[in-house]
Image (spheres, coloured by chain):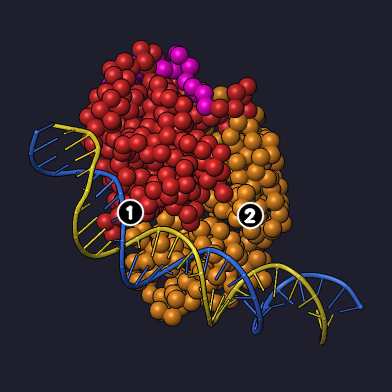
Chain colours: A orange, B red, C blue, D yellow
Amino acid sequence: MLENLKRLADHATTPSPRGPSLRGVMFHATDQGGAVELLTDAQRQQLAAIAKIDRVARRTTIYREGAIAENLFIIGSGAVKAFRDLPSGKRRIAAFLFAEDAFGLSEAGRYVNSVQTITPVMVYRLDASLLRETFKRDSALGVSFLCKAVHELRAAQRHTILVSRRQATGRLAMLLRLLEQNTAHLDLQKGVIEIPMTRSDIANYLGLSLETVVRASRVLERQGIVDFVGRHHARILNRHRFEQLAAAF
Amino acid sequence: MLENLKRLADHATTPSPRGPSLRGVMFHATDQGGAVELLTDAQRQQLAAIAKIDRVARRTTIYREGAIAENLFIIGSGAVKAFRDLPSGKRRIAAFLFAEDAFGLSEAGRYVNSVQTITPVMVYRLDASLLRETFKRDSALGVSFLCKAVHELRAAQRHTILVSRRQATGRLAMLLRLLEQNTAHLDLQKGVIEIPMTRSDIANYLGLSLETVVRASRVLERQGIVDFVGRHHARILNRHRFEQLAAAF
DNA sequence: CGCGACCTTGAGCACTGTCAACGCGGGTGG
DNA sequence: CCACCCGCGTTGACAGTGCTCAAGGTCGCG
């Protein structure tokens, strides 16, 4: 765990010199089907010109739901969670966000979610009104952000499907696959997944109780599909059965 | 029900002469907090120039998941459902869409959902590549679509919260409130909600079984909160308790 | 107006949520 | 450097709720 945090922290000290990155899958067809950089070098420089770089310690609230939305953020490195606290006291995590993701979703000028860091994080902070001005000058930039928003929309729909599953083991497997995709850039052994957040965070994301998450973990272990080593790492033992579970049944 | 369909159908025969509309709540602050028209008259004319108007009968598939995404659609009138059929045979409805909503969500050039009409529908069909060209000429148009996408993103997150609720009655109440908001433009008595889709559609949207939806309806009736009249209309009897249930607990 | 699609209801079961108690481990202060 | 401490994770028992399977009943479209 210590090593893990250190790696993320080191990563955070070397921001891309070219400015912020936005990753996503285009909605129109491209040569490569997978995720691509949505911004040109010129656009990144343009954004870098109006961006402030913030370094934030882990477990820090960046903003709260309902606050005046003055900034849009792009993650340089690290991981954050976007969540809402419901009247009942329950907390629903809408999304985990990683490097090259954007956050700052607002409605009528106010943030709709609260955002808290999970690891140490480096973010590019963009003034919302300055960004709107920039859109006016560069129409292609607006389209890039449209791509990103659409990408997030697809992710949100997948999340809904995930949460509607009845079996806890299936939901957990889907989360693990999500994490595997988003930590692929880290220098980890093949089949090893980094889990930066707590079990409680996972439960709030999956719409399960904390205990059920733990029990589902035990089930995956007992069936020889996944091995949980420590609190923040997992290893895929049986890729076939894992994918079978994680498939959006 | 007959009357209902007729009304929707009549509505469909009188498209706005000014071209397609896009409704949503802005992410930045405006005078009015609620939903606004996102397009200027000039933009609507611009879109109308590249739009084909289609009239589609009810229960018609507009496109299937995985098909090449060549169009973006904007609903003039009527209601559609966007869904995915899962390997298990289950169907998850990602969204119900109404007048002034857009659909045609794609990923790497292919539609991610299937879309089917629920009522007779009038849609504006926009060629995707023509639309992209239009974005290049009018940067503000891209921002308008960005607003719409962000609006849909917030809706998707609310949907996730909805589906993560345990109590069926609460989920059903939330759906009814959604329907109330989206059929408000119809000339219905106050407190009367139009339900264009089947119980099965509702179940697939709420992530419940068909039977549970029916049972939840009976519970709401027994508690004197809602009265279901026929298969496609509901009346709110106790607004206070209804809102209490529908609140995102 | 008739038939098919849709809705309704019941019984039994599987799964998760809740409550409660305990264990583990890293971080901190002496 | 070590020991304490608190957050986090783990496990068990029990009750509640929705899902499945199965069999009627009814609405409303053509």
Q: Is residue B222 visible?
A: yes
Residue under the image location 46 percent in, 35 percent down: B236
Residue at image mark 1: B211
Occupied quadrant, residue D29: top left
Give me the chain letter of mark 2: A
Occupied quadrant, residue B183: top left
Within 10 Å of disc 1 (Cα), the crowding (few <14, some 14-19, many 20+) is few
Give me the chain letter of mark 1: B
| Magenta run includes residue B43 | yes
Residue under the image location 37 percent in, 66 percent down: A245
* For residue B201, side relative to residue A228 (left or right): left
The CA span between labels 2 and 1 is 30 Å
Q: Amino acid at mark 2?
A: Gly
Q: Is residue A145 visible?
A: no
| Magenta run includes residue B219 | no
* For residue B57, side relative to residue B249 (left or right): left
Q: Which residues are magenta?
A: B35-54
Residue at image mark 2: A89
Mark 1 secondary-structure assignment: helix
Q: Amino acid at mark 1?
A: Glu
Q: Residue B167, how many percent across, how many down?
A: 47, 54
User: Residue C29 versus residue B205: which sits nearer the camera?
Assistant: B205
Q: Residue A11, how many percent across, how many down?
A: 63, 59
Occupied quadrant, residue B247: top right
Q: Residue A86, how many percent across, how many down?
A: 60, 50
Residue under the image location 28 percent in, 35 percent down: B117
User: Residue A3 versus residue B127: which sits nearer the camera?
Assistant: B127
* For residue A27, side relative to residue B148 (left or right): left
